[in-house]
Each structure stands twice: as C-alpha cells, then as structure tokens.
Image (tube, rainbow, N blue to C red):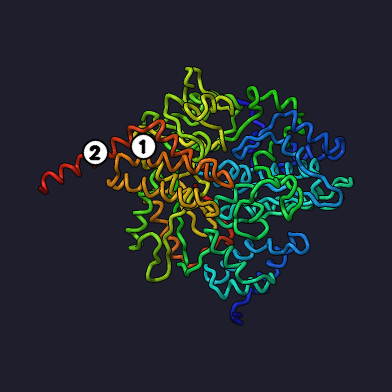
C-alpha cells in the first residue's frame, strides 16, 4: 500500500464537514504557517518539497511562486484552477467533492505565502453542484475564524470566493481562465507578460491546480524535505490518477510517484486489470493531449526498463517512444478498440474546444476532424495519412496557447505507433472501390 | 431594447448583487458568467436577446459584451430548450464504455435526433464533451445532476422519472442524492 497524503482521510464519515475535518488534523498548516513561519519560509518549504504543478504541465510550484512580482501597494491574487476539463481527468472533482476543506486550507496557507488577500476558485460550470459543497465549506471556515480579517489574531486577512465558468475547455489554460474570470470570452493572452507580473485585473497572480494547492497542506505540516522523500527522483510526493476506460476498477487513485505502470494497471489495489479478460492495446497516460502509447511501450521503455508512473519515466524516450504524466488522466484501451475512431473522437473534441484566435488551431483541428471522419466513413485515400501528419506538424508550436500542441500530439502519436491500422482501414475500402469500378465497366 | 416583463425575482436579485460583491470595486463585470447562469435558470432555460440586454443593464455594460460571452460558452443556450436538457458525454472514456449506445437508445425512446426537442417540449437531447465523469462512464448531465454508470434500463427509468416529475431542471437546482 503506497503512502497517501491527500486522500488519507477521505474514507472517514463526515469528512466533508468542518468538525470532522478539523478533528482529524485539519487547518494545522494554517496555524503553523501563520504563527511560526514567514511567508517566504512557506515558499521555501514548497521549493524544498520539489512539488510540480499537478494540472498537467509539471512546472515546479515553488519556482512559480517565487516569480510573483511584489510591487508595493498592488494587490496580489491566488487563483485556483478547478476548470478540470482534460478528457480522462476527474481527480479534482473527487477531491473537491469529498474533502473540500483540504482545498480551502491549501488556499489559505498558499495565499499567506504569496501575500494575497483575496483568492478565487475558478470551477468549471458543469461542476455547479460542487460549488455548493465548496461554498458551504467556505462559510464554515469563515465562521471558525480561518477566513476574514486578522486570521488567528495575525495581520493576515483573506477572502476566498468561488467563481463558476460555463463550459469551455480552453479556460483551463491559465490566461484564458483569467480572461473568463474577468467576465470575458476565454481567449488566451499572449505571454509575456506572465500572470506572475500582470494576471487578474492586471495584478500579479499565481494560478495553481486544485491538487497542487491541496499538496501544500502536507508539505507545510510535515516539511518540504519529508514530502520530497516520498516518490522517486524529481517526481516527489503523491499524484492523483484518474483511471478510466477498459479496466475493471475505474476511479481516482492516489499513488506514490514511481509505481510501475504494470502494477498500476493489473494490481487489484488500482485498476484491477483489463475488463472482460481482454488484452491491453494502448494507453493515453496523462489526459487526451499526451501521446498515446501501445501496450509494449507503456509497460516498458524502448530500452526494456519497466515504465514507472513518474514524470521522468513516462517521458523516457521523448515523443518517439514515450509520453507524459500530464494531468494523470489514465485512459486504458483493450484490444477491440479502434485507434482511428478514438483519434477522430479526440480531434473532434479539440475542434469543438478551439477558441478560434489562431488560424493553425482553428482551421487545422477542423481539417483533421474531417479527414479522420472521411476515413471512418469509407472515403479515405492512402495519402490521407500523410496529410494528417502534415496538418498536425503545422499546428504544433504555432499557436498562442498549448491547445494547438494538445490537438497535434494525439494525431502524431497515433500515426507514429499505429500507422498500419489507418492504412489497413483505407486499403480495405480502396479494394472495394476498385472492385465496384471493375463491375461497373 | 428593454422588456419590462423580464425581471429577476427579489430573491434572485439579492443573489445577483451578492455575486457582484465578490469582485473588487469597478470589476463587477467579472460577475457576468455567474449572473448569466442565474438568468438562464430563471428565464426558461435559455438566454434570449431581451434577457441578455437585461443582464447588461444590471451590470451597466454594453449588450454586445454579454452576447459575445454568452455565445462563447457551451452551457449557455441561445435558443429555447426542453424542460430537461439531456447532455450525454461523448468523449473518449465515455465512448469506450458505450456512450454511443446510450445516445442511440435515447434517440429511439424520445423519437428525436441529437440537437432536437420533443414535440411536447419536455426533452432536448444534446451530446457534450468530457464532463469529468470518466470513471463512472457512460454518463449524462441533466440540470445540475450527473447520472452515471448508465445502461439502457437505468436510462429508461430516468426518462420515466423526469417525465412524471415534469419540472424544468436547471444547473442551479439543489442536487439530488447521487446514485452512481
């Protein structure tokens, strides 16, 4: 059984409520930080912990915090990214629904470190029912003196608000999220300036994922060095993995980073193996945006080493033979799955979700969807595979935000690893077409 | 163009004002999306131009600032919808576990296609992108509630329940106890 830091108490009845949360050690990180640490010392612990952003990019959190500009007399903001929309990802929903006070505690402790007197939790609109859970928990935190003016009798005052979105994957990109929070369309901003300098309302702002902020709680309670002892190498701590698809036990699992992928898929502690006694065909390991890998490459690296659930091991081999940990949205496909159809599904998603600002993404995602659709409908040509490759290569790296890359990578990786499946599908209909021609002469 | 018949209830108006107070002075436009949710829930599940104009007047912003936002986000309906807007997730994890079967079953039962509304105005069927319910796939959202681990039988009994209750479901409803 791996170590649990975030979900160690989620099974306790009533943990959603303030009393039970507090009685099981809740809010001690706020006490410790406000009473015995300077804000910079809190940031220092987060740096020592090696915590990396849990939303998908994996950027070191302590470093992100230290970039925050601190001009005198200018408000600073912490914004929690709870827009969880990456296909295959549902861990933040689980955390907020089952243990809301953990996020609120993390928000207060993190805001103290950043010197932010106001913070927002931006939550996707479809999770409207969770806003009620969070708002109830926030009201309890105010009532018990953890939010509001002069918290614990110190100089630190803080207000925390929930802000609800309305359905747009792009708002998970931090500058689109800030635009949306300002009451506008979710069009990503050109960087620089980065949010750390000019974010919400032009003020210095840190945007962190739900799980990242929650992880600050054990880091402050136990110390950054203790946290860094969990996990493997530069992949410190634990990670929430959202497991879905053709497995026996879909769900959210907190793993110690470094668990072998094979153990994660087949052990009863986690996914419990492939459903219906089928064989594993492919895995999308970190949400729809990361490269898909065939069974042999997800279980072992190209060098034949066992692949581990860590930032480094999953990306071993680069995009040629590796992938990314991403958001931890772990989608498993059995031997019956059509890779071509799944790719069409993903491509349609990105076309639907492109904000439309950048031509390569706006047009390119639509073209890829159309080409894949015609292959599936039996109108594909052999040259379509190269055409798809060409389109994706002209999106990657040529857009304001990473949605373009996220749309390109699934296409590139599906062709890289499953080219023959595309070709066989096209070949079959080409033969039929030729046969029809012969008979019609 | 102001329509005098379009007004928030006193209770909604209090809530709208409390939403505007969540943002710093002069930044109340931030409340636009949350207020549009309140408006959609109160005014028959969709945002007519008159409703959007009314929201603009409350926030003291130009109507076009409301239109451009309302048309960007997928949860805002710019055309009338049935009392129950059924939103079935169609993205990968749900597709892998049979979302297509659920959609065609709903089409057969309701005698409509995706995007259409039943003639009695009770149901509108829509497919949507990933709702973060991948571990309990396939699923659909109706109003505020997620209905998960769907199969044909479960879908049938939900349709029956919605029909017998006959009420409009909104994102702002009190959630039902979730039965996953």
Q: Is residue A251 visible?
A: yes
In the figure, A264 relative to A206: above or below? above
Q: Secondary structure at mark 2?
A: helix
User: Residue A202, position in %: x, y?
Assistant: 74, 53
Residue nearest the viewer, comparing A160 with B63: B63
Per the image, the residue denoted by label 1 is A337
Say whether residue B140 is left or right of residue A162: left
- Disc 2 crowd rating (10 Å Cα; few below 14, some 14-19, many 20+) is few
The quadrant of the rendering that contains the N terminus of chain A is top right
Per the image, the residue denoted by label 2 is A428
Chain of the residue on which disc 1 is drawn: A
Q: Nearer the viewer, mark 1 or mark 2?
A: 2
Q: Residue at x 72, y 38 (%)?
A: A64
Q: Secondary structure at mark 1?
A: loop
In the figure, A281 relative to A306: above or below? below
In the figure, A410 relative to B3: above or below? above
Residue B137, located in which quarter of the rendered image? Answer: top left
Chain of the residue on which disc 2 is drawn: A
Residue A11, located in which quarter of the rendered image? Answer: top right
Q: Residue at x 48, y 31 (%)?
A: A271
Residue nearest the viewer, comparing A152 with A331: A331
Say whether residue A433 is left or right of residue A6: left
Say whether residue A381 is left or right of residue B172: left
User: Residue A262, position in %: x, y?
Assistant: 48, 24
Residue A59, located in which quarter of the rendered image? Answer: top right
Q: Residue at x 66, y 74 (%)?
A: B57
Q: Are marks 1 and 2 on the same chain?
A: yes
- Disc 1 crowd rating (10 Å Cα; few below 14, some 14-19, many 20+) is some
User: Residue B130, position in %: x, y?
Assistant: 49, 48
Q: Residue at x 78, y 63 (%)?
A: B25
User: Residue A51, position in %: x, y?
Assistant: 69, 32
Q: Are marks 1 and 2 in contact (CB under 8 Å)?
A: no
């Amino acid at each position: 059984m791996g170590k649990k830091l975030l979900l160690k108490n989620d099974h306790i009845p009533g943990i959603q409520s303030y009393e039970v949360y507090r009685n099981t050690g809740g809010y001690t990180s706020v006490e410790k930080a406000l009473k015995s640490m300077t804000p910079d010392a809190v940031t220092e612990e987060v740096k020592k912990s090696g915590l990396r952003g849990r939303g998908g990019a994996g950027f070191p959190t302590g470093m992100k915090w230290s970039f925050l500009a601190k001009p005198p007399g200018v408000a600073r903001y912490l914004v929690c990214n709870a827009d969880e929309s990456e296909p295959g990802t549902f861990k933040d929903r689980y955390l907020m629904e089952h243990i809301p006070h953990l996020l609120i505690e993390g928000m207060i402790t993190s805001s103290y470190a950043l010197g932010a007197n106001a913070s927002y939790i931006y939550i996707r609109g479809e999770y409207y029912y969770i806003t009620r859970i969070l708002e109830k928990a926030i009201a309890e935190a105010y009532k018990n003196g953890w939010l509001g003016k002069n918290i614990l009798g110190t100089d630190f005052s803080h207000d925390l608000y929930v802000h609800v979105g309305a359905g747009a994957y792009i708002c998970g990109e931090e500058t689109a999220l800030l635009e949306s929070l300002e009451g506008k369309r979710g069009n990503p901003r050109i960087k620089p300036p980065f949010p750390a300098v000019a974010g919400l309302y032009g003020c210095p702002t840190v945007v962190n994922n739900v799980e990242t902020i929650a992880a600050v709680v054990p880091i402050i309670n136990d110390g950054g060095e203790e946290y860094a002892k969990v996990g493997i190498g530069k992949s410190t701590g634990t990670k929430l993995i959202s497991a879905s698809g053709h497995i026996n036990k879909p769900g959210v699992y907190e793993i110690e980073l470094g668990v072998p992928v094979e153990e994660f898929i087949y052990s009863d502690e986690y996914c419990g193996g492939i459903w219906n006694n089928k064989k594993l065909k492919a895995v999308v390991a970190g949400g729809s945006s990361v490269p898909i890998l065939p069974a042999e490459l997800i279980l072992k690296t190209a060098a034949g080493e066992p692949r581990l659930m860590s930032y480094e091991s999953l990306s071993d081999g680069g995009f040629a033979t590796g992938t990314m940990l991403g958001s931890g949205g772990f989608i498993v496909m059995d031997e019956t799955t059509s890779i071509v159809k799944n790719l069409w599904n993903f491509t349609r998603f990105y076309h639907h979700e492109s904000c439309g600002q950048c031509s390569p993404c706006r047009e390119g995602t639509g073209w890829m969807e159309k080409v894949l659709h015609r292959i599936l409908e039996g109108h594909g040509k052999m040259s379509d595979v190269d055409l798809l490759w060409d389109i994706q290569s002209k999106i990657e790296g040529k857009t304001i935000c990473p949605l373009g890359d996220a749309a390109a990578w699934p296409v590139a990786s599906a062709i890289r690893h499953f080219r023959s499946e595309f070709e066989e599908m096209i070949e079959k209909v080409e033969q039929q077409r030729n046969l029809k021609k012969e008979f019609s002469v | 163009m102001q329509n005098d018949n379009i007004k928030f209830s006193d209770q909604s108006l209090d809530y709208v004002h409390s939403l505007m107070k969540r943002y710093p002075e002069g930044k109340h436009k931030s409340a636009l999306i949350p207020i549009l949710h309140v408006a959609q829930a109160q005014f028959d599940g969709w945002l007519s131009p008159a409703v959007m104009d009314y929201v603009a007047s409350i926030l003291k912003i130009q109507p076009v600032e409301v239109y451009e936002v309302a048309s960007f986000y997928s949860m805002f309906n710019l055309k009338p919808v049935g009392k129950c807007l059924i939103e079935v997730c169609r993205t990968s994890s749900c597709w892998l576990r049979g979302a297509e079967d659920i959609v065609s079953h709903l089409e057969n039962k309701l005698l409509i296609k995706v995007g259409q509304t039943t003639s009695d105005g009770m149901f509108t069927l829509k497919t949507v992108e990933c709702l973060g319910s991948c571990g309990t796939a396939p699923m659909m959202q109706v109003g505020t509630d997620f209905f998960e681990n769907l199969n044909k039988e479960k879908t049938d009994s939900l349709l029956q329940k919605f029909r017998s209750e006959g009420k409009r479901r909104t994102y702002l409803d009190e959630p039902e106890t979730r039965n996953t």
